[in-house]
Amino acid sequence: MRWGPRAATLVLVVAGMCCARSQPAAGPADADGYPTLKASHTERECAVWAREQSFARSVERHDADAFAEHVHPGAVFNAGDAAAQRGREAALKAWSNIIEGRTVVLRWRPGIVQIGGDPDIALSRGPYVLETAGAEPAKRWRVGQFQSVWVRDPASDTWHVLYDMSATPPEPVESLEAARRFVAAHAPLACTS
């Protein structure tokens, strides 16, 4: 099989997802009170960073239409797993409980965004907190790192999430405060270009 440059770039982005990042200097807190770190991003990386934050806010606002607008029609959610959801409609169905926020509450923050050789493909990574209402305290709060691959639609100049996955297995924590400490320790980066 022969791969074009765009496919090869995407494979390299997906394959290199577990890279460590250095910790830039601390900055001010974000809207939720989490400390932010400032890191240099390109203008395009900042556009993806803002889009990731908008995507997270669509879930926090329980806005299924806004959520869907962020998702590429051919998206793969829970990517890298045999039970992955393929396509926008499958992702919406799988995420309906999370979007509604009745029994599962998910919050995440964009951290670092990187664009490599193809300016229309970006990798985004950051911390998330997952709360399952009604679960016993030891299983109520889980934390981890998410990872998303975004692609830009050249016709509209809009970024859409193509692949979405957990970059680390979710780890239980004992309380909301412990979850907040996790996010603070993996503080989202403020986007500066």
Image (tube, rainbow, N blue to C red):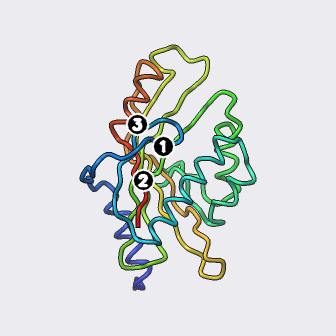
On the image, which quarter does residue 60 sit in?
A: top right
Mark 1 residue type = Asp
| Tag in front: 3 or 1 | 1
Callout 3–callout 1 Cβ contact below 8 Å = no
> Residue 30's mark?
1
Q: Residue 139, relative to residue 191: is it above or below?
A: above
Q: Is residue 79 left or right of residue 56?
A: left
Whole-Å distance between the Cαs marked 1 and 2? Answer: 8 Å
Q: Nearer the viewer, residue 93 or 193?
A: 193
- At 56% from the left and 60% from the top, the residue drawn is 51
Mark 2 residue type = Ala
Please identify the residue farthest to the front as the structure is shown: 28
Question: Can you identify the residue that label 2 sits on?
Answer: 190
On the image, which quarter does residue 117 sit in?
A: bottom left
Count residues near mark 1 (Cα–Cα under 10 Å), then give few for <14, some for 14-19, many for 20+: some
The percent coordinates of residue 43 (x first, y second) are 45, 72
Q: Residue 137, relative to residue 182: is it above or below?
A: above
Please state the total of marks drawn on the protein image: 3
Under circle 1, the secondary element is loop
Under circle 2, the secondary element is strand
Q: Nearer the viewer, residue 126 or 10?
A: 126
- At 60% from the left and 53% from the top, the residue drawn is 55
The percent coordinates of residue 97 (x first, y second) are 68, 36
Whole-Å distance between the Cαs marked 3 and 1? Answer: 12 Å
- At 42% from the left and 85% from the top, the residue drawn is 4
Q: Residue 41, relative to residue 111: is it above or below?
A: below
Q: Could you tell which of marks 3 and 1 lies nearer the N-terminus?
A: 1
> Residue 183's mark?
3
